Image: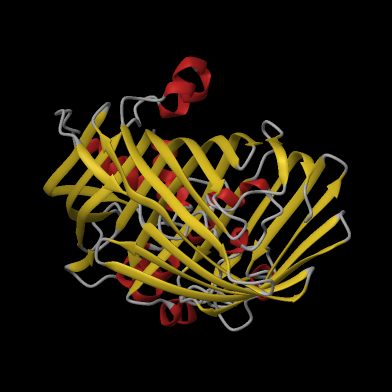
Amino acid sequence: MKKLIIATLLLATNYASAQNVMSLYNMRHIPQVVYANPAFIPLGRVNVSIPGLGSQYAQVGKSNFVTSDVASVDEFGTLRLDVDKFLNGLEDENLLYAASYLEALHIGFSVDKNYFFIASNDRLTGEFIFPKEMAALITEVYDEKGIVNGHTIEGTKVQYSHVREFSLGWARSFTNELNIGARVKLLSGIANIRTNSSAFVVETPNANNDLASLIDINMQTSGLENYSDYSENPLRAIAGYSNYGYALDFGFDYKLNSKSRIAASVIDLMGTITWKENVKNYVAEDVRVDFNTIDWSDLVNPGSSDGLSGIYDSIVSKVDPTQEKLAYETITPTRVLASYGYFLTPKIEVTLLGEGVFAKNYFEPRLRIGIQGRVKRFLNYMVSYAIVDNQEEVNNLGVGFALNLGPLQVHALTDNIFDPLLYNNSFNPSLRVGLNLTMNRDYR
């Protein structure tokens, strides 16, 4: 469990950004397009994802704090931090996140004017929010700036959730112009961390050069006790724990005329999970702990947990988790998407797509323009550009393709394609790749 917590702190997942379906929305040649709008009937009359290689999604990112050129390697090969540049680049509140959406099963087939599909996916979602004041716990910052007595760190939050999703979907062509679809999801909660509040009041170091701190923390967890051993129990891996919830998707697709069409969908409506099994609550008020500052190189070194393990051990050793069966609920943000498409040619379409992400006390609008088309029967492509998106800068560009080699389909989609190359303040690249078998494809 300790390694899980540390890994989450180092690379946590943003619940609001996971599974960005906007690029998928513009690729109707991919069977998984039903995840963006269940009314989109794929071209293949029989579609099966290859187990373990089906449509897999990943995203990493951060908020707009500056990370470029804050570190360098000296002549001795040691990683050095430019403290002033690092501190000046931090915002009052900073976010790190990553996401994955792993498809285990996807089967879809047409029956007359109906299309049915079943799917199983694992969602890993969460976030790590930290205030600017937390930088004082990094050794190089402390060595140069020190810590004033009574240094307060508030507002650190960790959210992590591993949910297995089982779904059943249906779409029907009611007329030549109108498709309507819906999808029902059973959500099985595997693991969850939710920090309700936290506060650190750090004192000056003692004679042993340890920092002393009074800590207040209130954190709820579920399913973490045996999480590292979860994959070793096949039956448990299928069913999960008794942490269940549900969500609904529905949508429509309407052809206005031979040149244009409109569509809309609602994703994860009423998406909730009640966590009631293997629940542990960590509650501490004015608990005194001692710990060392964090070495910068350990903190940024991929795969290393040494940077935070000392602080984690210090806190947990002084906080006994309560094991009261206090169920709690988490809510999945609801997404509303709407689009207008215009055919420049029978094979090339321009689409204006808007999305609104709704969560408690939170709303994020997005607007994207895209071009999608096909080259004969073997290649489908998509190019998109974000007009409105608070996670992306003006250099944002998304691209995607589906290569059809007989019944075998290879697809790849990406957003913010330049982010890994430019590494600007905004850093939010994503990638979806997968292999499908699509049979009896209809190109009319």
Looking at the image, residue 345 sits to the left or right of residue 243; the answer is right
Residue at screen point 14% across, 29% down: 324
How many numbered marks does the figure carry? 0
Above or below, 214 relative to 310: below
**Coloring basis for residues:** secondary structure
> Which is nearer the eye, 111 or 201?
111
Quadrant location of residue 386?
bottom right
Residue at screen point 59% across, 60% down: 177
Above or below, 67 relative to 23: below
Q: Position of residue 106 (x, y in %)?
A: 61, 35
Q: Position of residue 4 (x, y in %)?
A: 43, 39
Specify the farthest residue to the front.
175
Instruction: Identify the image quadrant of the N terminus.
Output: top left
- Residue 133 at least partly seen: yes
Q: Position of residue 113 (x, y in %)?
A: 61, 43
Residue at screen point 42% across, 63% down: 336
> Which is nearer the eye, 142 or 382?
382
> Which is nearer the eye, 31 or 39?
39
Residue at screen point 32% across, 37% down: 245
